């Protein structure tokens, strides 16, 4: 089987799901790491017309093994790519940043008169955090600002701040918002940013209804803006656990068909990933030590690693 045929065959084993992929040469060295919205389509593209990526052709010719991690969202894949590149930059990657997205947080101020949502580039000092709540980190400053616009549109917390004057008072009256509703708006905004499915669906449904009304009224520019806010809010509220605010350390393991996958979480960031051959008995203690919230992620990726190993070079012994 030629390397081109082998590469396409390996790509066919990948799911059409977001994630991170990695190419190794015949000596096991990592050549390149990237992320994809669809792993199958992206990896297959390296064995087709490279177009603007022609400089990667010599690297593709050296690929002996393809590895991949399936993520629960494109946002999670973006974070995982960045974490892995910052921990180790393969020779064919140009930048350790893993993209142009900025790391940001969302600050929720619940108290009048300054209640509302704000995008910030770093969390508050502990003394200030007692008066606010912050969510994140997120990747993508523009995406997060759009998400905050959409969330503020559906939940006009900034106009429920108590004493308002001038234009803000008139806008609050037009929106039908009063200070008495501030608690409920804060509660819903908190639930959305905590990724509560019902709260997220509620706000996305409100924005979708307004988008459809705007389109029906031929206000296409406003409808397009609302669609951007919907997509951005989906980005912010999608599952993402590979980078957290808590500085936790953990080893996350999954096992399938003689293949052990191990992820290293250090200071709240998943920044290491390896696969190796391992007997079931040797894997059991590592699986038992894996935190429950990670077991589905680890098992799914162990099954993928075992499937890829059956089509390519086997990973090394643990």
Image (cartoon, helix red, strand yellow):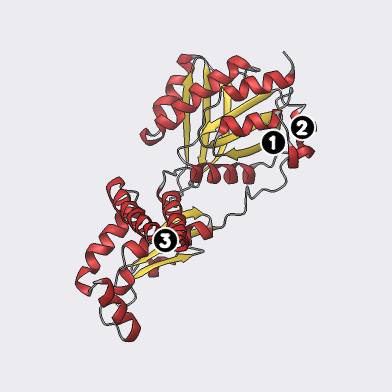
- The residue under label 3 is 218
Residue 41: quarter of image: top right
Q: Kindly check if marks 3 and 1 are in contact, taking CB atoms under 8 A apart as contact.
A: no
Q: What element carries label 3?
A: loop
Marker disc for residue 15: none
Q: Mark 2 points at which residue?
A: 59
**Crowding near the residue tagged with mark 2, few <14, some 14–19, many ≥20 C-alpha atoms within 10 Å:** some
User: Which quadrant would the C terminus be assigned to in this image?
Assistant: top right
Between residues 303 and 267, which one lies in front from this camera angle? 303
Label 2 residue SS: helix
Judge whether 303 appears above or below 75 on screen: above
Q: Residue 32 carries which label?
A: 1
Rendered location of residue 165, percent (x, y) = 30, 86
Label 1 secondary element: strand
Q: Which of marks 3 and 1 is nearer the N terminus?
A: 1
Q: Which residue is drawn at 61% across and 16% down?
A: 311
Q: Residue at x 51, y 64 (%)?
A: 121
Choose top left, top right, bottom left or bottom right for residue 118.
Answer: bottom left
- Return the x and y of residue 126 as percentages of the image width and height: 40, 65
Which residue appears at 50% of the width and 63% of the height? 122
- Mark 1–mark 2 distance (CA, rounded to whole Å): 8 Å
> Which tag is nearer the camera, tag 3 or tag 2?
3
Of tags 3 and 1, the one toward the viewer is 3
């Amino acid at each position: 089987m030629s390397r081109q045929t082998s590469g396409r065959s390996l790509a066919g084993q990948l799911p059409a799901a977001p994630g991170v992929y990695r190419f190794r040469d015949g000596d096991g060295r990592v050549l390149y790491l990237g992320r994809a919205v669809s792993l199958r389509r992206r990896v297959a593209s390296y064995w087709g017309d490279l177009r603007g990526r022609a400089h990667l052709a010599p690297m593709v010719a050296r690929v002996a093994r393809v590895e991949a991690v399936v993520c629960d969202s494109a946002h999670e894949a973006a974070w995982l790519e960045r974490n892995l590149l910052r921990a180790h930059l393969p020779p064919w990657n140009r930048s350790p940043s893993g993209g142009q997205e900025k790391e940001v947080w969302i600050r929720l101020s619940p108290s009048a008169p300054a209640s509302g949502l704000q995008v910030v580039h770093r969390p508050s000092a502990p003394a200030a955090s007692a008066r606010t709540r912050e969510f994140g980190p997120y990747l993508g400053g523009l995406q997060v600002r759009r998400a905050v616009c959409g969330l503020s549109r559906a939940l006009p917390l900034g106009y429920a701040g108590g004493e308002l004057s001038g234009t803000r008072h008139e806008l609050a009256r037009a929106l039908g918002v009063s200070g008495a509703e501030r608690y409920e708006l804060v509660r819903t905004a908190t639930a959305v940013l905590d990724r509560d499915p019902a709260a997220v669906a509620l706000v996305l449904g409100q924005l979708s209804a307004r988008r459809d009304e705007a389109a029906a009224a031929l206000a296409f520019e406003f409808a397009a803006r609302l669609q951007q806010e919907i997509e951005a809010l989906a980005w912010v509220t999608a599952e993402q656990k590979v980078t957290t605010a808590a500085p936790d350390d953990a080893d996350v393991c999954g096992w399938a068909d003689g293949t052990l996958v191990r992820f290293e979480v250090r200071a709240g960031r998943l920044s290491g990933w390896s696969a190796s051959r391992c007997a079931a008995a040797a894997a059991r203690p590592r699986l038992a030590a894996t935190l429950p919230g990670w077991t589905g992620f680890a098992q799914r990726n162990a099954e993928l690693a075992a499937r890829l190993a059956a089509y390519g070079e086997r990973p090394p012994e643990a």
